[in-house]
Image (cartoon, rainbow, N blue to C red):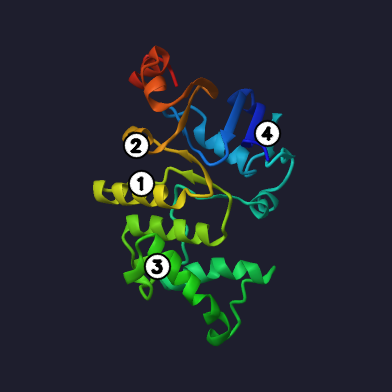
Amino acid sequence: MSDIILETRGLSKEFRGFFAVSNVDLKVRRGSIHALIGPNGAGKTTCFNLLTKFLQPTSGSISFEGQDITRMDAPDVARMGMIRSFQISAVFSHLTVLENVRVALQRERGGSFDFWRSESVLSVYDDRARQLLFDVGLSGYADVQAGQLPYGRKRALELATTLALDPPMLLLDEPTAGMAHDDVERIVALIKRVREGRTILMVEHNLSVVEGLCDIVTVLTRGSVLAEGDYNTVSRNPDVVAAYLGTEDA
């Protein structure tokens, strides 16, 4: 089994003459927490969308688990075990917290999420759902409607539903965005807990989160890789400092 779980070569995306991502070579090591950072407009979200196949690249290649996924569709890549979260909260607001996780667990039944099944049939997933809620610190919220959760708890619920799919690789798009300090600490601790046996690639603006959490950091600016290494290395790179201080037009 290769040490590299996800790799891009020359990955580029052009929009009417503008390269949002340009010739990005990226290697994500199995079992690591790897961050994509950069100033606003650096191409982080576009790169994320390319990796998870919500966008098709203009040129270059992407491989996951040694398989070329460059032209695959997003659902097929997700079925392979690369699952992403989004910046915008994505829960079923009218369902309870427990039911949200149970919907994700029902995937193992096949192509249908079985909304029409009786409560007794679907209750077989309750124990696993409650364990996942415990793992993300939501044990006391099982019967609460998801739409009533505070923002930080919704993000924890999203992580629980993602973990229900048991993916070998998680892609987290700004998991702490818009959170209060206490919620940030809770999510960071949660990511540390669930990393065992998984690889995590994340886009994150909060550099203190990146410093305390990530093994490898890739810095993007103007759609290209500016620097890569551990946090201490990249944070002392003069080009990185210049990009974040705004002396580059990113």
Q: Which of labels 2 and 4 is toward the front?
A: 2
How far is the residue under mark 1 from the one under mark 4?
31 Å
Disc 3: which residue: 146
How far is the residue under mark 4 from the one under mark 3?
35 Å
Q: Quadrant of the C terminus?
A: top left
Q: Which of labels 3 and 1 is toward the front?
A: 1
| Mark 1: amino acid | Val
Relative side of 100 to 16, left or right: left
Q: Earlier in the sequence, mark 4 or mark 3?
A: 4
How far is the residue under mark 3 from the one under mark 2?
29 Å
| Mark 4: amino acid | Pro
Q: Nearer the viewer, residue 171 or 96?
A: 171
Q: Earlier in the sequence, mark 2 or mark 4?
A: 4
How far is the residue under mark 2 from the one under mark 1?
8 Å
Secondary structure under the numbered disc 1 in the rendered image: helix
Disc 1: which residue: 188
Q: Earlier in the sequence, mark 3 or mark 1?
A: 3
Q: Answer yes or no: do the residues labelled 2 and 4 have beta carbons within 8 Å?
A: no
| Mark 2: amino acid | Gly
Q: Quadrant of the N terminus?
A: top right
| Mark 3: amino acid | Ala
Image coordinates of residue 242 in percent, x first then y, are 37, 15
Residue in the picture at 64% in, 27% down: 12
Point out which mark residue 212 bears: 2
Q: Answer yes or no: do the residues labelled 2 and 1 have beta carbons within 8 Å?
A: yes
Answer whether residue 107 is visible to the viewer in this image: yes
Above or below: residue 29 compared with residue 222: below
Secondary structure under the numbered disc 4 in the rendered image: loop
Q: Nearer the viewer, residue 2 or 5?
A: 2
